[in-house]
Image (tube, helix red, strand yellow):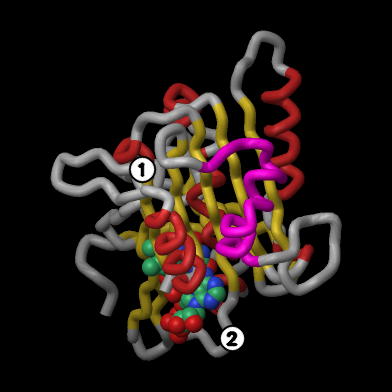
Amino acid sequence: MRPENSIEIKLLEKKCWRDGLVTLRFEKPKTFAFEIGQFVRIGLEDANGNYTGRAYSLASLPTDDYIELLVVAVDNGALSPRLVALEEGDSVILESYLFGQILPKRILGGSTLWLLASGTGLAPFISFIRSPFIWESWSLVVLVHSVRHLEDLAYRTQIETLSKELATYEGSLRRLIYVPVVTQEHSDALHERIPQLIDSGLLEEKAGIKLNAEDSRVILCGNPQMVQDVRQLLKTKGFVAPRRGNPGNLLAEALW
Ligand SMILES: Cc1cc2nc3c(=O)[nH]c(=O)nc-3n(C[C@H](O)[C@H](O)[C@H](O)COP(=O)(O)OP(=O)(O)OC[C@H]3O[C@@H](n4cnc5c(N)ncnc54)[C@H](O)[C@@H]3O)c2cc1C
């Protein structure tokens, strides 16, 4: 049975990055409001009325008139292959609650915001780099996206375009540094996993910025191993999560 107070929303647009990796744009209900960094729960019923719902990060901005999600089909997954197979005009069920640990307002301060994503952990960061709040809070944003194969680099062109626009906008001190990482295929991108890239100093070298607890704020989103490894590494560099009134400089969300 579908959860109480959930509503149906229609798929307006679908963009396929590669087989099994899509951006889905849904209609946004008039009453639907959220903050960047939050995620929704989306679901489908089967022919017997059994409901399956899962969490998906919001890639759109609160001011957009649509809800955008980046979804990968997990092999034999209960829901994600069905979401990826949706066609424009199909409906899904949007649950009524919103959740989220990685709210940028929780770690204000410093000059540089590091956004470290693996796989579909990129989704919330797509809204961040378009958000006026982010650019009012930090002048420098480093976006690192680690994937297995080149074709998994969703939004690459859009990110590169925004980065160029910011760099060439006269009088703007804002910079978006995009660092793609491709771990299982040789390319012009960095090749090692994010924890190794931090440990060796290669990530700082590539970005041309120091990653330190005084000037940097870090948000992690992606697979649990990456999140755990990076969190441990950053702890040794003095990064801490905000807790009970103590300001922190590190937020993390694992996707499973
Ligand atoms: C806070 C949060 C935000 C999330 N945001 C997104 C998002 O923006 N996009 C997205 O595609 N998924 C996201 N997920 C994962 C999503 O909720 C589902 O777990 C995923 O779609 C698989 O559901 P399923 O029913 O198909 O698989 P299930 O039958 O539930 O199988 C779950 C297994 O699938 C694998 N898995 C789960 N998520 C992923 C993933 N993203 N990439 C690779 N393997 C995965 C893991 O091995 C996990 O144990 C998020 C999860 C959380 C907790």
Number of numbered discs overlaid on the protein picture: 2
Residue 131: in magenta span: no
**C-alpha span from label 1 to label 2:** 35 Å
Q: State the SS at label 1.
A: loop
Which of discs 1 and 2 lies nearer the camera? The answer is 1
Quarter of the image with the C terminus in it: bottom left
> Which three-letter amino acid code belongs to the residue tagged 2?
Asp
> Vertical placement of 61 versus 109: above or below?
below
Q: What stretch is highlighted in magenta?
A: 193-211
Residue annotated with mark 1: 249
Residue 75's label in the rendered image is: 2
User: Horizontal and vertical percent for residue 233?
Assistant: 46, 60
- For the stretch drawn in magenta, what is the main secondary structure? helix
**Dot 2 crowding, Cα within 10 Å, few <14, some 14–19, many 20+:** few
* Kind of residue indicated by mark 1: Asn
Locate the N terminus and report the quarter of the image it occupies: bottom left
